[in-house]
Amino acid sequence: EAQVTQNPRYLITVTGKKLTVTCSQNMNHEYMSWYRQDPGLGLRQIYYSMNVEVTDKGDVPEGYKVSRKEKRNFPLILESPSPNQTSLYFCASSSRDSISYNEQFFGPGTRLTVL
Amino acid sequence: RKEVEQDPGPFNVPEGATVAFNCTYSNSASQSFFWYRQDCRKEPKLLMSVYSSGNEDGRFTAQLNRASQYISLLIRDSKLSDSATYLCVVMGGSYIPTFGRGTSLIVHP
């Protein structure tokens, strides 16, 4: 089954404790991205990757890191989480062949709470 | 001014009604347009792309007006299962899609 998986699905942590949210897709997609969704603000892109070893900042990259060492994986790293990073996070992927016209497939989301 | 704007609603309509949402965008160079559907606490899923000539998929019709810089989504014969948040997505020449904040639709019996 074609899918995007994220882990963990739910996480409660404390300020300053480094964490990683994993994202994996099995569709051989070149393009992957991370979003956060907050009430009243909608979905905002954090980082995206056009292919292995190619990453770039989205609209709200501060406080986040990403890496793309393998095509299927695109982890999101919070080196020192803060309460304002409490949010619902989505990973997404799509084919790069015609990205503007192709569907983005979203993972199920990770609900993060930073105390 | 936000790049992509939507009326947050909620739009509260009875079953069988026709309802329309609009979405305005500020970047005249925008090239691609989409409507996504998001159920409560779930991931967004593509509902339909929006083509210049307009397109229809069953009860759903999407249209693009480049001159006035808006896209629309029309839902005919609303079903209870149509209750969701509808997200407008616009992409320009970059690979950063811009999402609207979503329009909430509630279809009641």
Image (cartoon, coloured by chain):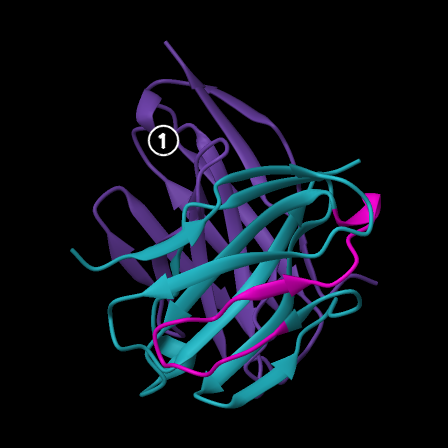
Chain colours: A cyan, B purple
Label 1: how many Cα within 10 Å (few below 14, some 14–19, many 20+): some
Side (left or right) of B86 relative to B57: right
Q: Which residues are magenta?
A: A66-85
The residue that disc 1 covers is B82
Residue B47 visible: no
Q: Position of residue B99 (x, y in %)?
A: 60, 59
Q: On the rendered image, what quadrant is the C terminus of chain B found in? A: top left
Magenta segment: does it hold B10?
A: no
**Where, quadrant-wise, is the N terminus of chain B in this rendering?**
bottom right
Q: Position of residue A21 (x, y in %)?
A: 54, 56
Above or below for B16 versus B92: above
Q: Is residue A30 above or below residue B24?
A: below
Q: Is residue B91 above or below residue A98?
A: above
Task: Give me the residue at 80% from left, 68% from top.
Answer: A62
Q: Is residue A71 magenta?
A: yes
**The quarter of the displayed image where residue A47 is located:** bottom right
Viewer-side residue, B61 vs A81: A81
Count the labels in the image.
Answer: 1
In which quadrant of the rendered view does residue B10 lie? top right
Q: Main secondary structure of the magenta part?
A: loop
Regarding residue B91, the answer to whether it shows in the image is yes
- The chain containing the residue under callout 1 comes to B
Residue A88 position, x and y percent, is 61, 44
